[in-house]
Image: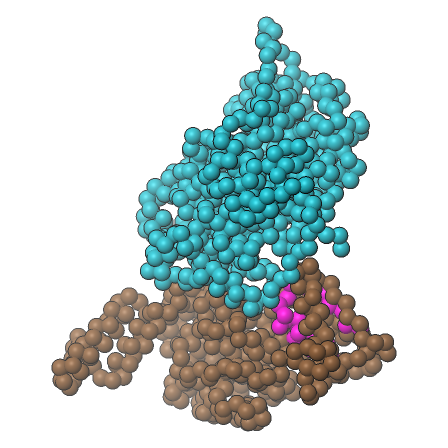
Amino acid sequence: MEWTNNALGRKIPTAIDGKLCLPFQGAFADSRGGEPSAAFSQRAHRTIPPRQKPDKRVADWDELFDRLELRDGARISFHHHLRNGDRIVNEVVARLAARGVRDLTIVPSALFPVHDALVPYIREGVVTKIEGSMNGAIGAACSRGEIQHTCVLRSHGGRQRAIQEGDISIDAAFIAAPTADPYGNANGLFGPSACGPLGYAKPDSEYAGKVVVITDNLVPYPCAPWSISGANVDYVLKVESIGDSSKIVSGTTQITKSPTQLRIAQLAARFIEATGLMKDGFSFQAGAGGISLAATVFLAERMRKAGVNASFAHGGATKVLVALLEEGLLGSIIDLQSFDLDAVRSCAANPKHIESDPYVSYGPHSRGSVANMLDVALMGATEIDIDFNVNVVTHSDGFLLHGIGGHSDACASAGCTIITAPSFRKRIPIIREKVTTVTCPGEVIDVLITERGIAVNPKREDLLWKAKKADLPCVNIAQLMREVQAITGVPASPRFTDRPVALIEWRDGSIIDTVWQMEPE
Amino acid sequence: MSESQVVEAGFASKSDCLARYTPSADTISVSIESSVGALFGGEIRRSALELLDSYGVETGRLEIEDEGALDLVIRARIEAVLRMAGFSRKTGLGVGFGSQPDEGCATAARAPSSRDRTRQIRLYVPGDQPHFAINADLYGSDMLVFDLEDSVAAERKFEARILVRRLLENDLLFGKSEVAVRINMIRDECGKADVDEIVAARPHAILLPKCESSNDVAMLDRLLSLQEKEKGIEKNSIHIIPIIETAAGVLNAVEIARASERNVALAFGYEDFSRDICAKPIPAGSTGAVLGKSAQIEALLAREMIVLAARSAGIQPLDSVFSDIEDTDGLTESCYQARALGFEGKAVIHPSQIEHVRRVFSPSEEEVERAKAIVAAYEESLKGGRGAVVFDGQMIDAPLVSKARRVIEESTRGE
């Protein structure tokens, strides 16, 4: 295998499975030149529908798979709106395995712990490649080299672009839909498995070879409203249940009680106000993690006090954001996925709660995305290095544990990107000399906020000056790293083989880093 | 303790570890299970070997179940099991494995705190739970009180005092706050053992619970002096804060406050006091209940006694905790009452209470403005060589100026 170093000095293969790997050149370099790949004829549907009402219903799974004719090596895709309650990914893979299909590539927008059930199929060679996120047991299997081919991790925007431009050609997209009609129009707003938006499935519905809508709540045509258009759907299957609703939405969005997390959140809110980002009509993305949620609450308190309203909040929606929308502090919520039932309800009922999709929200080749309109993005990290490069996918011990989500897209698009994280978790320091894996380049990360101080990227002298003026505890990131290491000790480096088990794709399709196989213990 | 007895210390929970020593005739073996083993397994083993070496342990089995504990915590847990098993530290450290001597025996290099520093907020930290201690310095309290008394179960006292000693010996975690230890009752052996263990770590102050007479203070004073001498620590550098939480203590408050030069404050303990005098809660819905639980009417005389005793002895009166963490309105109300009664500070049991207490005890904007004006007028008068100055119809004298300076200083504290 031949190797090259990309612009961040990370070692990447020059080609994988005969496909060229473009080295990352910079956050906005667009290494691919914006050219659609040769495979971009995927969705060539050249049949004019016959007169009147095509019948898209299939009676059962068997009829569905008979019609789909998926063969060894097929590429199938899924969305993750049902999160840890999803039943469809495991069901489809198990049924294909039972039919003797092997060598599948699965292309999920994300996977959850419930999908650990795929591990046996990985070991048996039913699933041999994953292009999506790899968490938990699947991440560990990938890191140990158990997945036959080199996998690919992309951000939500990067995935959308790759599908649109034919980097990934999907043979069949399986779209779990909480509500759908026999024509395939579908939404996630109603039904026993309601999950809110359904946007992550949209690129799949537009560009996959065959599109299947699977629902447990079939309604007469037309399903209103529709997030997935029946015009793109080939087959509709009614099943007993697409998911476990108690695990689709958490129902309780609790504000953290951890004093360390609260301190970080409070510092983040103070920083946003002190640096003048919090001005009338501003916008933010904060996510649903413990620190982000608390930061949203603290920020709202400051907005109320200062008489400032935000024009919109973007990303995942929670009951906290819904309350702010109803209070009038927020003009809109632009929602990619709802995390609780209040958010689902609001998304269905409130016209100012806008359902989005990855092209509109994050599309790298869109003509400006929602993320581009963000003034501030509060994001997490598992590691950050002294050049502000961020890792969200691997643990410091080298194992894959997360997907990228919208992290890279929001970071590279918002006016100010803030990483909030404790300076160490258990005994593991967050700031490293070099991160284990780069998922987002330091050039688009402006600030790190920890309980032990705020480190501003030297590129953002403007922010540093304002933060210092407001008496915020500003620190140098390298110095903070050394302080924390004095407390925790310096962790040993993971030992890898030279086999790449996964590639980290930057938004433009270039390779920003490689995930290596762990050396056997 | 019998030879064959297995001893354990610590918890296999976040940021802590469980250490277990099993005596046997076999050559010492060490097994380590750690959730951060890939990153710190080597360091954990090195620490374990160093301790075994400095305690001269050559046989038996040491097991460690680690959940990401810091090195000092791991060492505290290992030290605890080795001492429980009857080993004691050898002189001449660092022999054997060619390792560094275990530093957990040196006297910490902490300077004494000033007697009259601000003590508006003292945060209690349970003495046997490292998870709560690690970041405790960051939440903006004036004083951290590592508790060996009520928050530590009787069978955990031994390992807790070792953990607290090692926490205090560390000079990276606690640099902002004054650090103190609430020991057990000095009339019990447990309280004396606490003092023997903790003095080498040089806490700024010892909180003396259930203090009932000047004898209690005198006893602690003597023990501290003895330990200070033995450990080569400057005499009288460790302060005492007696906690009055019984009827007898209240009645002897005056002698207690004056019992030692070490006394810097007198604190009240509401919950124990209320129990001691057999006070009963007012039923909800009765007229008395409108005062709310923050009124603590049964303790009014006691609180005022403590303020008077402290003030007459020239030390700070500090109020008790408000134990309902969720009830921030009640906490605020309780702080206003404490402030009105003359207390200078309050204890908190959760960091989330800090901002509420600070808000009450910090001077208001008007108070700060007034203080600044007084200081300005005074400095102007010094420049002009004039003697007495009148401000707002009030003569400005030295105590007024120093009080004004204090107000300005307090206003800059907190976030």
Q: Is residue B276 above or below residue A22?
A: below
Q: Is residue A4 above or below residue B244?
A: above
The answer to whether residue A221 is seen in the rendering is: yes
Chain painted cyan? A
Q: Position of residue B216 (x, y in %)?
A: 55, 90
Which of the colour schemes (rainbow, by chain, secondary structure, one colour) is used? Answer: by chain
| Range of residues picked out in magenta | B61-82
Q: Is residue B235 left or right of residue A109?
A: left
Q: Is residue B373 above or below residue A465?
A: below
Image quadrant for the N terminus of chain A? top right
Q: Position of residue B19 (x, y in %)?
A: 72, 71
Q: Residue at x 60, y 52 (%)?
A: A436
Q: Residue at x 49, y 92 (%)?
A: B235
Image quadrant for the C terminus of chain A? bottom right
- Front residue of B23/A122: it is A122
> Is B24 covered by the magenta stretch?
no
- Residue B17, quarter of picture: bottom right
**Chain B, chosen colour in render:** brown
* Count of numbered circles on the image: 0
Q: Is residue A263 left or right of residue B187?
A: left
> Is B74 covered by the magenta stretch?
yes
